[in-house]
Structures are given as C-alpha cells and as structure tokens.
Image (cartoon, helix red, strand yellow):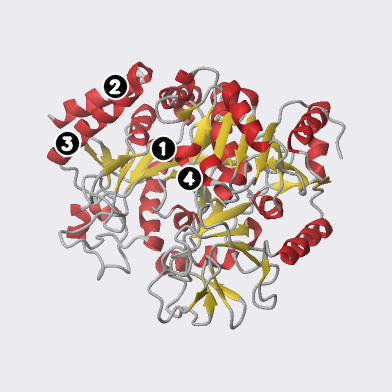
C-alpha cells in the first residue's frame, strides 16, 4: 500500500491507542467497496434499497442524538488561544489530545480499523491535498468513497511526503456528552469522537477542506472557502466561472445546479456545476484566481429537494447514493422526504426507524437535516472541467444572505477591498420557521464563521493580502439577496432558475457591457438592465426598482449593527475594514 514512514508510524501509534481487532486498508476498488456494502447490510448498518429503481443506493439511519454538526463541541486546538479567535471554541492542544485519547483508548476493540487514503481535489492536481482517515465505521468508508477520491493512487502520489492531514474517527458509544470534533491546525490533525453523522465524521469535508485548509491557505497564499463554483456558458460557447458563498438555508446547492429560464435555454445559455459547497482557490500562472472543488460528491440536504426546486440534484441521487435519515417507503423499498412530492408513503418507516404513515402522521418522516451522499459524476450538468486539476478561472465572487429588507437584489462592490467588506458583513435574518425572534440579523462573514480554522480577524487580513497579490486580475465582487419580502411577507423576487437573470447582469458587469448606478454601498443595476422577459406577470419593473433601492436610513441602522459586530474582533480587525465602515458611514450622510 505505502512505505511512507510518517503514515506507517502514525497508524502504528493509533493502533496501539484504539486496539482494533483487525486493520483493513481501503484500496478504492469496486470489489472491496461492494464487500463492505454487503457487510454493512448484514449488520443492519445500511439497508439496500430497490436496485431497479435506485441502483447502487442504500439507506442509513444515525442515532437519534446524532443528526447534525455540533458547533458547540467543535474546537480549534491551536497552541495559543488568540490564534483560534473569538468565534471558535478553543482547547489547549496537550489537554485536548489527552482528553480525546482517553475517550478513544481501546474503543476499536471488537471492531475493524479502516485506513482511508484520500485526495481532496483530483489526484495529483497541484491544487489537491492528501489526507488519511482512520475510522471504525463502514458508513464513513462508503461515504468517503463518494465524497473524495479514495484508494491506492493516493498513496502513489503521496510517496514519502510527510505533508498530509491525519484524521482519527472513533464512533465510541455515540455518547453526545463525550462528542468532540477537534482540529489541530498546527499539526495537520483532526480527531472526531462519539459521532456517526456525516458533517462530524467525513473528515475530508468541513474539518479538512475548510477548517484545516483555511489555515494552510493563509500560510501558503491560497484560499479555502465555503463556496459553490459554477460556469455560465453563453450562446457563443464562452464559459465564465463564478464562486458564491451563502450561509446555510439560502439555496447554495440550488444555485450551483441552476437551470436557466426557458428564454435563456432557447438562446443557448447553460450552467455547469463545478462544486456546491467548497472552493479551493489559488492564483494561477496568468495571475488570475483558479478554483477547484476539492470534493467528489454532494452531501446535500434532502428535504425540499424535488424535480422543480433542483432537478439536477434529484437526478444526482438516482444511482450510487447513500441516503441518511430519510423515510423508507416499504411498498417499493425506495426513499421519500418532505418536499419531494405531495404523496408521502403510507406504509413507511421514518428517520428514527419507526413505522410511519405519511397520510396521517403529523410528525415529519425525514429528519429536517436528512441527507443524500451522491457522486458528482451523476449530476446532469457537471462541468467538463470538474475532474481537471488545473481549476477554473474565477471572474466573480458572489456573497449572499437572506434579508427581508435593506440589502438590494444585487450590488457590486467598488473594488476588491470594498468586496472584502461586503463579505465581512454577510448576514441572514431568522425566519418565522425557526423558534425565537423573527428578523434577528445573524452575521456570518463569507459564510465561514463555523468553518474558519483560525482567528477571523487574521482571515479578513488574508483576504486583503490576496487582493494585493491578484491586483487588477482579482475577481469582481458582488452581493445578492433573493429573499426580499413585501409587507405581507411574500417574496418579491421569483428566485430559483430566475436567479440566472441576476447572474446575467453580473457577467455583463465583469465584461464591462452593463451600466450601473452608484450608491453608498456600491453599484446597483438599472432596473431595465435586468432581463424580465417571460416573468413580467410575476414581477414588474416597479417592483424590481423597489428591490434595487438602497435606503439610507436602513443602511445607517445596518452600519450600527456592523460596528457592534466588528467589536468581536478587537484589535485583530484589519484597519482596512474599519476604514471601509467609516467610508460607508460617510457616504450615508
Ligand atoms: C453543510 C453545511 O452541510 O454548510 O454543507 O452545514
Ligand atoms: Mn456547507
């Protein structure tokens, strides 16, 4: 498999710690994976679904206390507390290792240790990075084999190199009181104990590709971002790539796989998906910013996904997919979730494994955070560039949030530094759907608050540094808000595929062919420049004008909120951001 000394030594050390009955090296072959699927089915860890309707698809149910990422139990264990910053939990590394190793000690007794070599990014790509995950869960092996590039080729590329990310996962007893997801950025190490839920245990994803990678990126001059990547092809065949960051529940996967409105399709426009969650970006030889999606699959939220909201995501789940915590329809052994269609199965099992009748039950059948793990290659609009290691050149970076008012449908920052400010003030409002006060603004800079592996103040500074490196080749920066409401709480913008109309304006700005109006916050479109052809009954020019307005009073209030938020970062807040805020206040006078 490998002769890499740093790998072999670490595995020996971990074996001594967790005491597995046996060790299985994952070679990435279909034979081996098939054997593991059969084994998982024999123990009940997974259920084989209807192979005619859903070939290669399986269902898994997590423990009921283990259904989501646990931010309050997620730690950045840097030597100095200040380096984790005020927005992360911190633990002293020696103390954390001791605590984790005490929990992990002997926990593989009677179990198998699976050794998963994986590459985040196409194997051998100059933008890719290698990790090794040790796990006692077949579910983790099979998910990792979808979400990352796994197997012998990874060892071949790694060779003797000691630079790789260590990941130890121990299910232990799935004890919520002893659940910890700990990151040691200075040691390239992740330890996750007492969970079996994807976001906590597929260590290549949030743990490596965002928390560890953001720290590596800062030190090595690149960026690991919580962003989708899409390519927009015009009728002449030219593809322009954009990356976009949104907090959760703002439709990131939907935007990544957008189907343009009919008028655009007829003209020959097309959207290509490169990634739906994470972007690794690095300046290329020509000075532009190039991005890869380090993942190889989609770990998407199932509820709400349907043929209308996201045809491409649904199509991606038709084969070779692992469903987690959705409803099992016993009539035909398929799956269902709220928002899939209007026909919940009667003879079914809910996400907890209990009998469930969707025609009468008042309880949800699928967990609201139920998931599909689907291979990216299944996606009908997966980009031809997806597997190419050199990445795609990013022309625009788009930030967004869910705001009933204040933030216009779209605006462009004045320049890169102003764009960093726009990203730093990203926010969403709580909706009536969630418990607690409605309309409370939650700030989530660049959608990275839960995922930045170091001090957020240093993270902002890194963005300014990247701007200096990129100079006039830097992507243009925009902000969008699909969620403006009228006084009765109706959405004013149709959203979904019609968001293409806003992307269209963004690309025109990148190409310098569209005009704009300068406002205190940046450039907004002239209403006539947003194409409303085909949706005139849904939104007229007057309404569009309304959602493009920048209201000075609302923005003065916003500036106060930003000032308050910035206090969190103390003297680590880059002075450039303070200057940007002062400038905004001045422009609002
Ligand atoms: C995700 C998240 O699962 O951002 O992608 O929470
Ligand atoms: Mn995400």
In space, the residues marked 4 and 1 are separated at their CA atoms by: 15 Å
Q: How many marks?
A: 4
Q: Which residue is mark 2?
A: 578
Q: Are marks 3 and 2 in contact (CB under 8 Å)?
A: no
Residue 295, image x and y in percent?
62, 47
Q: Which residue is mark 3?
A: 557
In space, the residues marked 1 and 3 are separated at their CA atoms by: 21 Å
In space, the residues marked 3 and 2 are separated at their CA atoms by: 17 Å
Please tell me which residue is depicted at 52% across the width and 58% down the height of the picture.
64
Q: Is residue 587 left or right of residue 256?
A: left
Q: Is the CB–ligand 1 distance for label 2 below 8 Å?
A: no
Given this view, does label 2 or label 4 mark the residue nearer the observer?
Answer: 2
Whichever of callouts 1 and 2 sits on the residue coming sooner in the sequence is 1
In space, the residues marked 1 and 2 are separated at their CA atoms by: 17 Å
Given this view, does label 4 or label 3 mark the residue nearer the observer?
Answer: 3
Residue 529, image x and y in percent?
29, 53
When asked about the image quadrant of residue 314, the answer is bottom right
Number of residues whose C-alpha sits closer than 10 Å to that of mark 1, classed few (under 14), some (14–19) or many (20 or more):
many
Q: Are marks 4 and 3 in contact (CB under 8 Å)?
A: no
Quarter of the picture holding the C terminus: top left
Whichever of callouts 1 and 3 sits on the residue coming sooner in the sequence is 1
Number of residues whose C-alpha sits closer than 10 Å to that of mark 2, classed few (under 14), some (14–19) or many (20 or more):
some
Residue 156, image x and y in percent?
83, 38
Q: Is residue 500 left or right of residue 333?
A: left
Q: Which residue is mark 1?
A: 446
Quarter of the picture holding the N terminus: top right
Q: Are marks 1 and 3 in contact (CB under 8 Å)?
A: no
Whichever of callouts 4 and 3 sits on the residue coming sooner in the sequence is 4
Whichever of callouts 4 and 1 sits on the residue coming sooner in the sequence is 4
Is 428 drawn above or below residue 31 in the view shown?
A: above
Please tell me which residue is depicted at 69% across the width and 51% down the height of the picture.
137
């Amino acid at each position: 498999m490998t002769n890499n000394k740093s790998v072999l030594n670490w595995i020996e050390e971990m074996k001594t710690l967790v005491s597995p009955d046996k060790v299985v090296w994952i070679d990435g072959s279909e034979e081996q994976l098939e054997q593991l699927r059969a084994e998982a089915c024999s123990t009940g860890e997974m259920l084989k679904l209807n192979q005619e309707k859903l070939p290669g698809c399986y269902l898994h149910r997590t423990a009921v206390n283990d259904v989501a990422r646990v931010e309050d139990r997620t730690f950045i264990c840097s030597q100095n507390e200040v380096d984790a910053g005020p927005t992360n939990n911190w633990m002293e590394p020696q103390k954390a290792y001791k605590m984790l190793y005490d929990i992990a000690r002997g926990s593989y007794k009677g179990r198998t240790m699976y050794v998963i070599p994986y590459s985040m990014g196409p194997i051998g790509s100059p933008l890719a990075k290698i990790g090794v995950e040790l796990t006692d869960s077949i579910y983790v092996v099979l998910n990792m084999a979808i979400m990352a590039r796994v197997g012998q080729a990874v060892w071949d590329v790694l060779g003797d190199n000691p630079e790789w990310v260590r990941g130890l996962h121990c299910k232990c007893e799935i004890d919520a009181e002893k659940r910890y997801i700990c990151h040691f950025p200075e040691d390239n190490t992740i330890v996750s104990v007492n969970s079996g839920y994807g976001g906590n245990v597929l260590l290549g994803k949030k743990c490596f590709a965002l928390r560890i990678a953001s720290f590596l990126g800062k030190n090595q001059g690149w960026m690991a971002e919580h962003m989708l990547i899409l390519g927009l092809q015009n009728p002449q065949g030219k593809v322009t790539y954009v990356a976009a960051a949104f907090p959760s529940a703002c439709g990131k996967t939907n935007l990544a796989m957008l189907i343009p409105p009919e008028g655009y399709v007829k003209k020959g426009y097309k959207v290509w998906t490169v990634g739906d969650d994470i972007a690794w970006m690095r300046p290329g030889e020509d000075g532009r910013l190039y991005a890869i999606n380090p993942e190889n699959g989609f770990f998407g939220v199932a509820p709400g996904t349907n043929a209308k909201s996201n045809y491409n995501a649904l199509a991606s789940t038709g084969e070779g997919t692992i469903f987690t915590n959705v409803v099992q329809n016993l009539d035909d052994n398929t799956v269902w979730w709220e928002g899939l269609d209007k026909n919940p199965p009667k003879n079914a099992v809910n996400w907890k494994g209990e009998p469930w009748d969707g025609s009468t039950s008042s309880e949800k059948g699928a967990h609201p955070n139920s998931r599909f793990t689907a291979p990216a290659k299944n996606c009908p609009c997966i980009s031809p560039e997806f597997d190419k290691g050199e990445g795609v050149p990013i022309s625009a970076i788009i930030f967004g949030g869910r705001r009933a008012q204040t933030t216009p449908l779209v605006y462009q920052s004045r320049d890169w530094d102003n764009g960093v400010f726009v990203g730093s003030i990203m926010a969403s409002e709580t909706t009536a759907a969630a418990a607690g006060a409605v309309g409370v603004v939650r700030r989530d800079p660049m959608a990275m608050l839960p995922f930045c592996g170091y001090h957020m103040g240093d993270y902002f500074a890194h963005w300014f540094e990247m701007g200096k490196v990129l100079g006039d080749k830097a992507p243009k920066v925009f902000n969008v808000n699909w969620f403006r409401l009228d006084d009765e709480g109706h959405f004013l913008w149709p959203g979904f595929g019609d968001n293409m109309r806003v992307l269209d304006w963004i690309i025109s700005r990148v190409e310098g062919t569209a005009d704009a109006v300068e406002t205190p916050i940046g450039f907004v479109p002239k209403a006539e420049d947003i194409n409303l052809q085909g949706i005139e009954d849904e939104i007229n020019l007057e309404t569009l004008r309304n959602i493009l307005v920048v209201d000075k009073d609302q923005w003065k209030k916003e500036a106060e909120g930003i000032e308050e938020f910035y206090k969190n970062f103390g003297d680590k807040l880059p002075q450039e951001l303070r200057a940007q805020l002062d400038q905004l206040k001045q422009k609002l006078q």
